[in-house]
Amino acid sequence: MERKVLAVCSVVSILGILMVATGFAAEGTRTKYNQVIQVTPTTCKYPRSPALGLGLTAALSLLLAQITINVSTGCICCIRGPRPPASKWRTAMICFAISWVTYVFAFLLLLAGAALNDGRGEQSNYFSYYECYVLKPGVFAFATIVGAASLALGLFYFLILNSAKNDPTVWGNPSVPPQANIAMAQPQFPPPPPPRTADPMFVHEDTYMRRQFT
């Protein structure tokens, strides 16, 4: 079981580091406003940018890490075996819910940022008549931070559920042998004999006979 935990944590950590590296790299190489050429008042020419590939790599890394966590943990509605105590179970459920919300948010932001840096060449501008639309600064960085938080919460959720399977104090753990029935009544024993006051003395038969005739 410890090998499985170590393997899952290692894979998620590697994918998380890759997502952070490519996400911040996409933020640094995104298309700037001064790189866009306005051909006509309604047409803008966008250059090619490495932020497209970097953003897609970050989104793919986040997706694979989320899949790894959920496959290793199993479906939350179909968990079989022991569960952690109520307080830890509530914490795990909160981490699970927040992890999924932040994952969806970060994944969509990374895809949207990559789509807006695809080097699409000349394109008609429908957003503004005099300005060419570019991705605002900080979108990739914010999505990367949210994605890292999502993976951290997912790992925490995974570790809580896995600890319940290895905790011998958790009720329902198959690794704990069933305890024998313990009798709760008082044992019934005969009362002890009263203490002896003195040891009996041995009297010789001749002495006893002489006392009888005197």
Image (cartoon, rainbow, N blue to C red):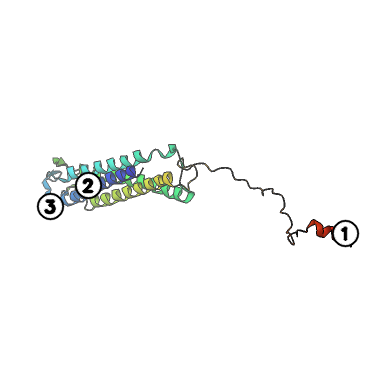
Query: Can residue 171 be seen?
Result: yes
Looking at the rendered structure, the number of numbered marks drawn on it comes to 3
Q: Nearer the viewer, residue 178 or 93?
A: 178
SS state under label 3? helix
Query: Quadrant of the rendered structure where residue 206 is?
Result: bottom right
Q: Are there few (<14), some (14-19), or many (20+) residues within 10 Å of tag 2?
A: some
Q: Residue at x 86, y 61 (%)?
A: 211
Residue 81 is labelled as none
Q: Which residue is mark 1?
A: 212
Mark 2–mark 3 Cα distance, whole angstroms, equals 29 Å
| Tags 1 and 3 touching, CB below 8 Å | no
Classify the position of the C terminus by image quarter. bottom right
SS state under label 2? helix
Tell us which disc is closer to us: 2 or 3.
Answer: 2
- Mark 1 residue type: Gln
Q: Residue at x 31, y 47 (%)?
A: 151
Q: Position of residue 2 (x, y in %)?
A: 34, 45
- Mark 3 residue type: Asn
- Mark 2 residue type: Leu
Mark earlier in primary sequence (1, 3): 3
Mark 1–mark 3 Cα distance, whole angstroms, equals 139 Å
Q: Position of residue 74 (x, y in %)?
A: 38, 38
Mark earlier in primary sequence (2, 1): 2
Q: Which residue is mark 2?
A: 18
Q: Are there few (<14), some (14-19), or many (20+) residues within 10 Å of tag 3?
A: few
Q: Which residue is mark 3?
A: 34
Query: Quadrant of the rendered structure where residue 110 is?
Result: top left
